[in-house]
Image (cartoon, rainbow, N blue to C red):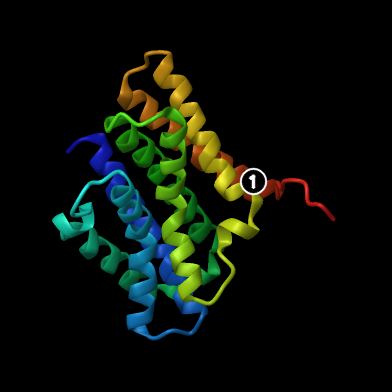
Amino acid sequence: MNLLLILDLVGTFFFAVSGAMVGIKKNMDLFGIIVLGTVTAIGGGTLREILIGQFPPFALRQDLYFYLAICGSLLTYLFVEQLLRIQSVVLLADALGLGTFVTIGVTKALDVAITPTSAVILGTITAVAGGMIRDVLAQEIPYVLTRDFYAITCILGGIVYLILEGLGLPRRVTMAIVTAFVVLLRILAIRYRWKLPHPY
Protein backbone atom coordinates (compact mmCIF):
# COMPACT_ATOMS: atom_id res chain seq x y z
CA MET A 1 0.00 0.00 0.00
CA ASN A 2 1.61 3.29 -1.09
CA LEU A 3 1.77 6.48 0.99
CA LEU A 4 -0.75 8.33 -1.19
CA LEU A 5 -3.40 5.66 -0.64
CA ILE A 6 -2.70 5.52 3.10
CA LEU A 7 -3.11 9.31 3.39
CA ASP A 8 -6.27 9.16 1.31
CA LEU A 9 -7.87 6.52 3.53
CA VAL A 10 -6.81 8.26 6.75
CA GLY A 11 -8.18 11.58 5.53
CA THR A 12 -11.44 9.97 4.42
CA PHE A 13 -12.03 8.41 7.82
CA PHE A 14 -11.22 11.50 9.87
CA PHE A 15 -13.26 13.84 7.67
CA ALA A 16 -16.20 11.43 8.00
CA VAL A 17 -15.88 11.74 11.79
CA SER A 18 -15.89 15.55 11.66
CA GLY A 19 -18.82 15.59 9.21
CA ALA A 20 -20.87 13.16 11.28
CA MET A 21 -20.31 15.31 14.38
CA VAL A 22 -21.97 18.24 12.59
CA GLY A 23 -24.95 16.04 11.78
CA ILE A 24 -25.23 14.96 15.42
CA LYS A 25 -25.03 18.55 16.66
CA LYS A 26 -27.81 19.43 14.20
CA ASN A 27 -29.94 16.63 15.71
CA MET A 28 -30.15 14.69 12.44
CA ASP A 29 -31.18 11.06 12.30
CA LEU A 30 -28.71 8.28 11.52
CA PHE A 31 -29.19 8.62 7.76
CA GLY A 32 -28.52 12.36 7.88
CA ILE A 33 -25.41 11.80 10.00
CA ILE A 34 -24.06 9.28 7.49
CA VAL A 35 -24.83 11.61 4.56
CA LEU A 36 -22.98 14.51 6.18
CA GLY A 37 -20.05 12.29 7.12
CA THR A 38 -19.84 10.87 3.60
CA VAL A 39 -20.04 14.17 1.69
CA THR A 40 -17.40 15.65 3.99
CA ALA A 41 -15.14 12.67 3.38
CA ILE A 42 -15.40 12.37 -0.41
CA GLY A 43 -16.87 15.67 -1.63
CA GLY A 44 -13.60 17.56 -2.04
CA GLY A 45 -11.79 14.76 -3.83
CA THR A 46 -14.73 14.17 -6.13
CA LEU A 47 -14.83 17.85 -7.14
CA ARG A 48 -11.06 17.82 -7.71
CA GLU A 49 -11.29 14.89 -10.08
CA ILE A 50 -14.16 16.46 -12.00
CA LEU A 51 -12.08 19.63 -12.46
CA ILE A 52 -9.05 17.74 -13.77
CA GLY A 53 -11.19 15.56 -16.03
CA GLN A 54 -10.83 12.21 -14.31
CA PHE A 55 -14.05 10.27 -14.91
CA PRO A 56 -15.61 8.54 -13.20
CA PRO A 57 -14.32 10.10 -9.94
CA PHE A 58 -12.34 7.89 -7.54
CA ALA A 59 -15.25 7.25 -5.16
CA LEU A 60 -17.27 5.67 -7.96
CA ARG A 61 -14.41 3.37 -8.92
CA GLN A 62 -13.59 2.08 -5.43
CA ASP A 63 -16.33 1.26 -2.93
CA LEU A 64 -13.76 1.28 -0.13
CA TYR A 65 -14.12 5.06 0.23
CA PHE A 66 -17.87 4.83 0.77
CA TYR A 67 -17.45 1.98 3.25
CA LEU A 68 -14.79 3.89 5.17
CA ALA A 69 -16.89 7.07 5.29
CA ILE A 70 -19.94 5.14 6.48
CA CYS A 71 -17.83 3.30 9.07
CA GLY A 72 -16.40 6.59 10.39
CA SER A 73 -19.91 8.08 10.59
CA LEU A 74 -21.35 5.05 12.39
CA LEU A 75 -18.51 4.94 14.91
CA THR A 76 -19.04 8.63 15.59
CA TYR A 77 -22.75 8.00 16.14
CA LEU A 78 -22.05 5.09 18.49
CA PHE A 79 -19.37 6.87 20.54
CA VAL A 80 -20.68 10.42 20.35
CA GLU A 81 -20.87 10.86 24.13
CA GLN A 82 -17.19 10.07 24.51
CA LEU A 83 -16.27 12.35 21.61
CA LEU A 84 -18.31 15.24 23.00
CA ARG A 85 -16.36 14.97 26.26
CA ILE A 86 -13.09 15.34 24.41
CA GLN A 87 -13.65 18.04 21.78
CA SER A 88 -9.92 18.08 21.10
CA VAL A 89 -10.27 14.68 19.39
CA VAL A 90 -12.78 16.07 16.90
CA LEU A 91 -10.57 19.08 16.18
CA LEU A 92 -7.57 16.80 15.75
CA ALA A 93 -9.57 14.59 13.36
CA ASP A 94 -10.41 17.62 11.27
CA ALA A 95 -6.78 18.78 11.27
CA LEU A 96 -5.57 15.33 10.20
CA GLY A 97 -8.14 15.23 7.41
CA LEU A 98 -7.11 18.70 6.28
CA GLY A 99 -3.42 17.83 6.19
CA THR A 100 -3.83 14.58 4.31
CA PHE A 101 -6.27 15.97 1.74
CA VAL A 102 -4.15 19.02 0.91
CA THR A 103 -1.21 16.73 0.25
CA ILE A 104 -3.27 14.36 -1.89
CA GLY A 105 -4.87 17.19 -3.84
CA VAL A 106 -1.56 18.85 -4.76
CA THR A 107 0.07 15.52 -5.60
CA LYS A 108 -2.71 14.42 -7.94
CA ALA A 109 -2.89 17.88 -9.52
CA LEU A 110 0.84 17.89 -10.30
CA ASP A 111 0.53 14.41 -11.80
CA VAL A 112 -1.74 15.79 -14.56
CA ALA A 113 0.73 18.58 -15.38
CA ILE A 114 -1.32 21.65 -14.49
CA THR A 115 0.28 24.90 -13.33
CA PRO A 116 1.74 25.15 -9.81
CA THR A 117 -0.81 27.82 -8.85
CA SER A 118 -3.66 25.58 -10.00
CA ALA A 119 -2.15 22.70 -8.04
CA VAL A 120 -2.32 24.74 -4.82
CA ILE A 121 -5.92 25.71 -5.62
CA LEU A 122 -6.89 22.10 -6.25
CA GLY A 123 -5.16 21.00 -3.07
CA THR A 124 -7.24 23.53 -1.16
CA ILE A 125 -10.45 22.47 -2.92
CA THR A 126 -9.73 18.84 -2.05
CA ALA A 127 -9.43 19.77 1.62
CA VAL A 128 -12.32 22.21 2.04
CA ALA A 129 -15.00 21.51 -0.58
CA GLY A 130 -16.46 18.51 1.27
CA GLY A 131 -16.84 20.61 4.41
CA MET A 132 -18.51 23.38 2.43
CA ILE A 133 -21.08 20.95 1.02
CA ARG A 134 -21.63 19.60 4.54
CA ASP A 135 -22.26 23.07 5.95
CA VAL A 136 -24.68 23.99 3.17
CA LEU A 137 -26.66 20.80 3.84
CA ALA A 138 -26.61 21.63 7.56
CA GLN A 139 -27.87 25.18 6.77
CA GLU A 140 -24.72 26.82 8.10
CA ILE A 141 -22.41 29.45 6.63
CA PRO A 142 -19.51 27.31 5.34
CA TYR A 143 -16.87 26.95 8.03
CA VAL A 144 -14.11 27.85 5.58
CA LEU A 145 -15.65 31.32 5.08
CA THR A 146 -15.86 32.11 8.78
CA ARG A 147 -12.61 30.60 10.12
CA ASP A 148 -9.80 32.67 8.65
CA PHE A 149 -6.96 30.24 9.22
CA TYR A 150 -8.69 27.25 7.67
CA ALA A 151 -8.32 27.73 3.92
CA ILE A 152 -5.15 29.77 4.49
CA THR A 153 -3.61 26.74 6.18
CA CYS A 154 -4.32 24.69 3.05
CA ILE A 155 -2.87 27.34 0.75
CA LEU A 156 0.31 27.58 2.82
CA GLY A 157 0.60 23.79 2.80
CA GLY A 158 0.33 23.79 -0.98
CA ILE A 159 3.05 26.44 -1.27
CA VAL A 160 5.37 24.45 1.01
CA TYR A 161 4.73 21.40 -1.19
CA LEU A 162 5.82 23.32 -4.30
CA ILE A 163 8.95 24.61 -2.55
CA LEU A 164 9.99 21.13 -1.42
CA GLU A 165 9.22 19.72 -4.85
CA GLY A 166 11.41 22.41 -6.38
CA LEU A 167 14.25 21.47 -4.02
CA GLY A 168 14.15 17.95 -5.42
CA LEU A 169 13.09 16.09 -2.28
CA PRO A 170 11.67 12.61 -2.82
CA ARG A 171 7.92 12.86 -3.18
CA ARG A 172 7.22 10.57 -0.22
CA VAL A 173 9.28 12.86 2.02
CA THR A 174 7.55 15.95 0.63
CA MET A 175 4.11 14.45 1.24
CA ALA A 176 4.95 13.47 4.83
CA ILE A 177 6.39 16.91 5.64
CA VAL A 178 3.48 18.82 4.10
CA THR A 179 0.88 16.69 5.88
CA ALA A 180 2.61 17.25 9.24
CA PHE A 181 3.03 20.97 8.48
CA VAL A 182 -0.67 21.51 7.74
CA VAL A 183 -1.80 19.51 10.78
CA LEU A 184 0.57 21.40 13.08
CA LEU A 185 -0.37 24.78 11.62
CA ARG A 186 -4.07 24.03 12.03
CA ILE A 187 -3.58 22.96 15.65
CA LEU A 188 -1.58 26.11 16.40
CA ALA A 189 -4.24 28.27 14.73
CA ILE A 190 -6.90 26.72 16.96
CA ARG A 191 -4.74 26.93 20.08
CA TYR A 192 -3.80 30.59 19.64
CA ARG A 193 -6.95 31.69 17.77
CA TRP A 194 -5.09 33.09 14.81
CA LYS A 195 -7.19 35.29 12.54
CA LEU A 196 -6.68 37.46 9.51
CA PRO A 197 -7.42 41.21 9.75
CA HIS A 198 -11.10 42.18 9.45
CA PRO A 199 -12.36 45.44 7.92
CA TYR A 200 -14.13 46.32 11.18
Q: Quadrant of residue 105?
A: top left
Q: Depth check: give the residue in front, 34 or 39.
A: 39
5 is higher (above) or lower (below) than 50 = above
Can you see residue 7?
yes
Residue beneath the point at 43% across and 13% down: 167
| Residue 139, image x, y percentages | 53, 77
Badge count: 1
Label 1: element kind? helix
Decide if residue 145 is on the left or right side of residue 27.
Answer: right
| Residue 69, image x, y percentages | 29, 63
| Residue 133, image x, y percentages | 44, 66
Q: Depth check: give the residue in front, 116 or 16.
A: 116
Residue beneath the point at 70% across and 46% down: 194
The residue labelled by disc 1 is 189
Viewport quadrant of the N terminus:
top left
Q: Amino acid at mark 1?
A: Ala
| Residue 163, image x, y percentages | 48, 21
Decide if residue 144 is on the left or right side of residue 12.
Answer: right
> Furthest residue to the right?
200
Q: Depth check: give the residue in front, 49 or 149.
A: 49
Residue beneath the point at 52% across and 78% down: 25
Can you see residue 181?
no
